[in-house]
Amino acid sequence: MSNAIALGAPRTVPAVNNDRLEVIGAAALIGIAGAVQFSIAGAQILLTLAVACWLGLLIVRREHFEAPSFFWPLAIYAAATLVSDAFSFDPRTSVIASKQLVIFLLVPLTYRLATAQRASTLMTVVLSCAAISAVVGVVQYGILHYDVLQQRPQGTLGHYMTYSGLLMIVVSIAIARVLFGKGGRLWAALVIPALVVAIALTLTRGAWVGVCVAAALLFALKDFRLFAILPIVAAIFFAVAPGLVMQRFNSIFDKKDPSSMDRVAMLHVGERMIQAHPLTGVGKNMVQPLYAQYRGPDAVNKINPHLHNNFLQIAAERGLPALGIWIWFIVALARDLWTRFRSGEHQFLAAAGLATVAALLTGGLFEYNFGDSEVLMLFLIVSTLPAAAERSRSADLSGLRTGAGRP
């Protein structure tokens, strides 16, 4: 009887509709990964469509909710955020700001809709869109005079930090594909120079460091002898980098650099906020309005929108328990990616995920990139792809899902 039902199901209208929902949802997911590099509004529209298709599949097919193991600490982190909102200095503002937590649904959504082939297509779309975005940034710098600290290349996005954060992730993906990919390696190699030039021109030092750490990790995973090319890369950088880029690079080692001094001042502000509110923090989006109350004499800027550090921002905004949960999520994610990388299955996807985590954590020492919606969306998608590819493979092998309607 079960065989008859399985054979007959594809002929029914519901089965056709199911397949259509899956195809549309997968296309929307791929679209999110591309659109997020140009427009957050466009990416959010596609996210709404993808979530609707995913929920439709769960309801129509009566599927159980599934998610990789690292999603659960992320869900608990979301709950801790809502608890912090309840004790916020302005609960209404904090609750409204917490709508960003919807982005976390990208983990189970990607886990359900992505397959190995779709993951490969998604990565190609990401690289292609980033190549276009990189060209826009170079044009802004070279022709439109986005060549000062107060006005830097930002692509079509609203801020250069978001732009550089996305480029940082995509450079990690491109290097991972060149080193571990089975296809699309030539295209990845071709776009890397444009991506590197664009991210250099943003003058965003944290993103530079993030790219370097991600590249170093990928070299170590592939072959330590690859580190021999670093002197060549450094020589090219020092030879061709514009004067402004070199000035920005040298400022990394300048203790009197104003932005570096302000980063240190933010550490002190964060410490005071945590000491005053260790359990629930000051509340989401409350750092900026309360900054003056905790500001010390060493502060360079009177007001800052956030504390430019993932660890510090989360602890000050949501409390030390939330920070501990977030670290649990990062550790669980890294462990999952490492296990999949060592298994040899979908090694490119796992390597890209590991490099992305390394880049986000390193860049996040100088910028609150986990709170940047565009960066967070791409990060969660890329990090979940290895688990999703393995899930689809296991499901196909066990006969739980057919190949109908999937590329």
Image (tube, rainbow, N blue to C red):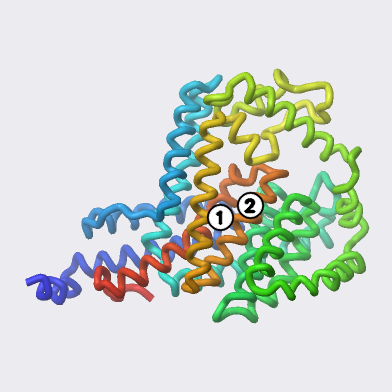
Nearer the N terminus, badge 1 or badge 2? 2
| Whether residue 123 is visible | yes
- Identify the residue shown where x is 42% and y is 68%: 389
Where residue 372 sits: x, y (%)?
Answer: 60, 45
The residue that disc 2 covers is 360
Local SS, label 2 = helix
Q: Give the mark toward the camera: 1 or 2.
A: 2
Describe residue 42's horizontal placement relative to residue 76 as left or right.
right
Local SS, label 1 = helix
Describe residue 326's horizontal placement relative to residue 364 as left or right.
left
- As shown in the figure, which amino acid type bears the numbered disc 2? Leu
| Whether residue 32 is visible | no
Q: Label for residue 379?
A: 1
Closest to the observer, 97 or 71: 71
Please rate how many residues cluster around mark 2, counting C-alpha atoms within 10 Å: few if below 14, some from 14 to 19, many from 20: many
- As shown in the figure, which amino acid type bears the numbered disc 1? Phe
Closest to the observer, 174 or 326: 326
